[in-house]
Image (tube, grey):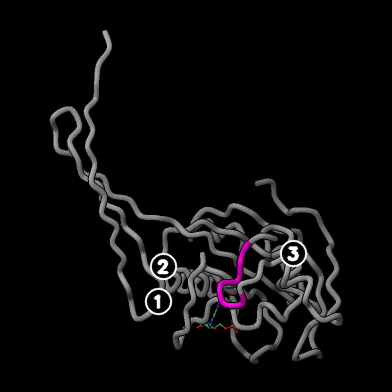
Amino acid sequence: MSSFIYLSIRSRTSEANLRGCPRRIVTVSSGIIRGQKATLAWTMSTIAYLSLGSNLGDREGHLRDAVARLESQGHVVAVSSFYETEPVEFANQPWFLNCAVAIETTKMATELLAGLLEIEGSMGRHRAQRKGPRLIDIDILLFGNAIIDSQELTVPHPAMHERRFVIEPLAEIAPEARHPVLAKTVRQLWDSLPPGQVVRRIAGPPMAR
Ligand code: AMP
């Protein structure tokens, strides 16, 4: 015997705007299923791209540890190879190991930033010198197509398009991701990078995804 489900759904999407920061989008659908009123609510997720770097101690171990800890902030969907990179701006320090990560998260950008700072702190990072050596650094490059310019957070990351150590790993996992301010894909940003900074891919993807 076949059964029929009569479904009529009305959806409402609401956006909470917090001090100019990106919005958590909650969709609430209500309708009638088999004569019963039903309500469903879910939170939309965002793909954020992060840049990770370390130039102190066991650099590879620190990157792997940080990627594992990122699962507390969402679902890690892609990790680039690790790249050995020449320091920029403050050149008199050890070379870095960098990678890029894509994470799917239901957090708002400010919540994600707080989570990243907590991971950095729990791994033992101390901010001794600006632009100086660091055990671990995690930056938000892109957060969906959000544009954020607040005191605590700037997204897209303001220097990402000038940095080969950021763009090259990112291009490996997300060449078609779009910079919402410059209106260019990551591949196009890579093509426009000036020559100069040495960036060497040293390993295949560090973990199967
Ligand atoms: P640093 O660890 O030296 O990269 O600086 C971290 C600080 O930069 C954080 O406390 C944030 O408030 C600020 N910040 C601004 N924009 C970003 C971003 N896109 N990603 C990470 N940190 C950011």
- In primary-sequence order, the first of circles 2 and 1 is 1
Label 1 close to label 3 by CB (< 8 Å): no
- Disc marking residue 60: 3
Label 2 belongs to which residue?
108
Label 2 close to label 1 by CB (< 8 Å): yes
Identify which amino acid the numbered label 2 is placed on.
Met
In terms of secondary structure, where does tag 1 sit? strand
Task: Report the quarter where the N terminus lies.
Answer: top left
Identify which amino acid the numbered label 3 is placed on.
Glu
Q: Position of residue 25 (x, y in %)?
A: 35, 61
Q: Quadrant of ligand 1?
A: bottom right
- Disc marking residue 21: 1
Which mark lies nearer to you, 2 or 1? 1
**Residue 179 among those drawn in magenta:** yes
Q: Residue at x 48, y 61 (%)?
A: 73
Q: Position of residue 54 (x, y in %)?
A: 71, 73
Which mark lies nearer to you, 1 or 3? 1
Identify which amino acid the numbered label 1 is placed on.
Cys
Q: Taking 113 as reference, is 129 left or right?
A: right
In terms of secondary structure, where does tag 3 sit? helix
Q: From mark 1 to mark 3, how far is it between C-alphas? A: 33 Å
